Image (cartoon, coloured by chain):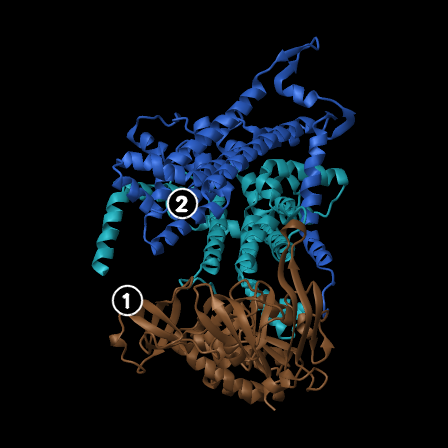
Amino acid sequence: MSVAQAAALPIAERARAAVELENVEKTYGTGKSAVKALKGVSFDIADNEFFTLLGPSGCGKTTLLRALAGFESVTAGTIRLFGEDIVDVPTYKRSINTVFQHYSLFPHMSVAENVAYGLKRLKKSKSEIEATVADTLELVKMTDFAGRLPAQLSGGQQQRVALARALAPHPKVLLLDEPLSALDLKLRQSMRQELKQIQARTGITFIFVTHDQDEALSMSDRVAVMSAGYVQQVGTPNEIYEHPANRFVAGFVGDANFIDAQITSPVGAIVTCRTEGGAVLQADARNLLEGQRDVTLFLRPEKVKLAKAGSATVDGEITDIQYLGNSTMMHIDIGEAEPLVVTEPLGEVDQRLRQVGDRVGVILSPSALQILVE
Amino acid sequence: MMANLPSSPALRRTLSLAPALGVIGIFMLIPVCIIAVFSFLEAKSFGGVVWSFSTDAYVQLLYERALDDSLMLSPGYLIIIWRSFLLAGIAMLCCLVVGFPVAYFISRQPLQHRNMWILLITIPFWTNQLVRTFAWIIILGRNGIIEAPFHWVGILGSDDTLGLMYSNFAIAVGLTYTFIPLMVLPIYASLEKLDFTLVEAAADLYSSKWEAFSKVIIPLSKPGIIAGCLLVFIPSLGAFIQPDLLGGGKNMMLGTLVQFQFSTARNWPFGAAIAMILLAAVVIFLMIYARAARGQQKMELH
Amino acid sequence: MAAIEHSKRKKRRAFGEVPGLGALAIAFMMFLYLPILVLVVYSFNAGNIVMVWTGFSTEWYARAFANEDIRKAAINSLVVATSATAIATTCATLAALALARGGSFKGKGATVGIITLPLMVPEIVTAVAMLVFFSNIGLNFGLGNVILAHVTFCIPFAFMPIRARLDGMDTTLEQASRDLYASDWETFRLVTLPQLMPGVLAGAMLSFVISMDDFIITLMVAGAGDTTLPVYIYSMIRQGITPEINAVSSILLLFSIVLVTAYWFVTRTKPDGKNH
């Protein structure tokens, strides 16, 4: 079964989860000036999973990572590593290794010595250390640099060594603290692929922290979206994007349109609503609560189709056009509080014909409109 | 070999601080407290103290006992105190007048040159004070470097002297020479941080060179100036080597006076009293500095 | 672009430059080094009276080296400086580690104040205080008294470069070490200490120079047989000025200059912002 399927099973049924977080809380300071960085965080991470913590700065993702590594203590809750409670286990005894954001390579040791460091502390035999160091350096393609000092390496090279150093002791879980943030775009994109491949080859659970949603969506088996110390949603990239659990997730991952409306008649899987602007729309009723009448509808810009005025769900007027290369982004006023953001991929219609001021028909299909849980 | 240091971080920290604090506490704090106490005790004839309370030491600063046991105002020691403050002040001013332009000059040099200049200024400062002051005996003394030409030319006879040595002037020269690096370095540090575009902005706004100097450069380098002045004034106040070697017996300062009490005069309480006064003066100046520094910080924070 | 930068630089120098400043700076340097030069030059004076030049001779250096008292004083100086440096640097390192890594605690400011206290109390006050202390407590370890006194005022000098180095160090390195299964002691030994070494070295050098050069405190505290070089030079000056004093002084000067220059090279930060 796939990782996503396994994650959907109740805990007792699947293979023991790599990491189990239960009501983890972290408070800094006391009294009036106390800051709660983590509030009741609970979810599981499966073995051999590429798991990402995604969120804006200050959301608590780094705090959670550091709590897993042992650099921070937790104020409440439990953390289990393959069933074993590690909350009171000191850092150097946890079988978890970290790839630091700024690499933190030991400047007075060579690349090989850096990579061997953890193995030496674990008192492995000399032959085993040599073999592991060689294998790991090959895995990150840094074999030729074994004798160099960190100061002699570029940023990307240092990052590979940092990865090798953390992988060499073969930890149960690998933590990666925004490791690609200091690299330039092209390098970042190629490293994403490499990281994915390395995770697949080693079978080690990767927990990856980033604020970049593209990274999260492209690399992960599952993502936990965080904000202000809370976990907003845990799911596969597809679930997060297509079916965001709430307004924050909808707005943070990708662009989103929000339309306020009132339920006029529930019809099974689909519900009819009337918007503030008077339009009648049909939406996916999946998230509708018992007795709920006021809803916020959510819609991705690329799910909107345009047609001739008068032939679609609603009519609107184009108020802004931005050419983005492989698509065109338009703002269309359909009489609601905010104009609709619509993206049309290149080639569907001859975009050169669209002009500000044009009246167009906007097709809003029920499968594209979802009800948001606030 | 320990695998783990003592577990409690607070305990570890205390153990770590103990040696340094212990040494300074035992060999400095306690001794200073002891002489503070001594200054209020009676003097024993050939050194040492008698354990009975007495303010004789402090009284001795101002008054002398006449044969009929009445007190007469005796200015001798007050003159010494006055000389100490005067010469320390003169040294400070000379250092400032010479040191500021030099510091300014260095701060305007390209980066590689600047380090060279600073190194060259630092080196003499770390050499032995005694030795450097001794050099001035050679320069200022009878038949010394300065006098010698006068002798050759015949202006001075072989037994005459310009009298540069063994004077307040010689002490001032010695103090200035010894401590001037301590004026240059802090001012340089301040000026180096100075954003020179501020001066350009002043010029842009029609300031003359002098106005730019007094209204922009001086206020912004004030922390360095104050630090430099204190670093020269305070050690000069309690100096021993310069008045001893260059001043001769007649031009005592607080430092030589204290040492005299503990060697020849053998009046420990009196020596302790003078030391206390010196210490008090230093503490007062440091507190003034601390307050000025805090005010400066407030200005920079906005 | 480069042309504009260049002309801007030229304009800046032209605006900020004060005429004659360069000459003043050079004159200042001459003022600073002339006495030292005079001292050294006259140590090669053949004649008896320092100020009257009678010819070139290294006789006084020979005499200085042969002088048994001078040799004893020099050895005492070296012994005291070495011992005091070793002890003071250790104390200072421990204290710096506690203050930089120990988190905040009540009285942290006061602790730093006490450690830097010897820098603020006038030397003569410290000197007589120690004299009174040693004689009243009846402590008499001979040269040990001098060593203890030197340790006291060397600690702050060793402390400052070490503290500065610690403050500039990257703490994530220690985290990384712990992350990779190193115990606290291993982390200290393998990561912290090697990083700290340049600071410790600088502190030791500073402490050594300060100890070698100390005069007034040693004068008051040292007993009859425990003379150090500066104190001996003083007694020579008191007895009468001969070029032998110049010779000994020049040697002492050379020693200090070499040490300070070495210290400067060790602590110099390279263009990339790191040292060593």
C177 w.r.t. B176: above or below: below
Q: Secondary structure at mark 1?
A: loop
Residue to which mark 1 is pinned: A357
**Label 2 CA crowd tier, 10 Å (few <14, some 14–19, many 20+):** many
A78 w.r.t. B28: above or below: below
Residue at far top of view: B68
Relative depth, front residue between B225 and C228: B225
The disc label shown at residue B188, or none: 2
- B266 vs B240, left or right, is right
B65 w.r.t. A82: above or below: above
Picture coordinates of residue C115 (x, y %)? Answer: 63, 47
Picture coordinates of residue C208 (x, y %)? Answer: 56, 53
Residue at far front of view: A265
Q: Which chain is brown?
A: A
- B46 vs C83, left or right, is right
Q: How many marks?
A: 2
- B39 vs C160, left or right, is right
Q: Colour of chain C?
A: cyan
Residue type pointed to by label 1: Gly
- Residue at the spot 70% in from the left edge and 20% down from the top edge: B56
Relative depth, front residue between B270 and B10: B10
Q: Secondary structure at mark 2?
A: helix
**Label 1 CA crowd tier, 10 Å (few <14, some 14–19, many 20+):** few
- Residue at the spot 64% in from the left edge and 52% down from the top edge: C104
Q: Are marks 1 and 2 on the same chain?
A: no
Instruction: Write down the chain letter for disc 2.
Output: B
Q: Which chain is blue?
A: B
The disc label shown at residue A41, or none: none
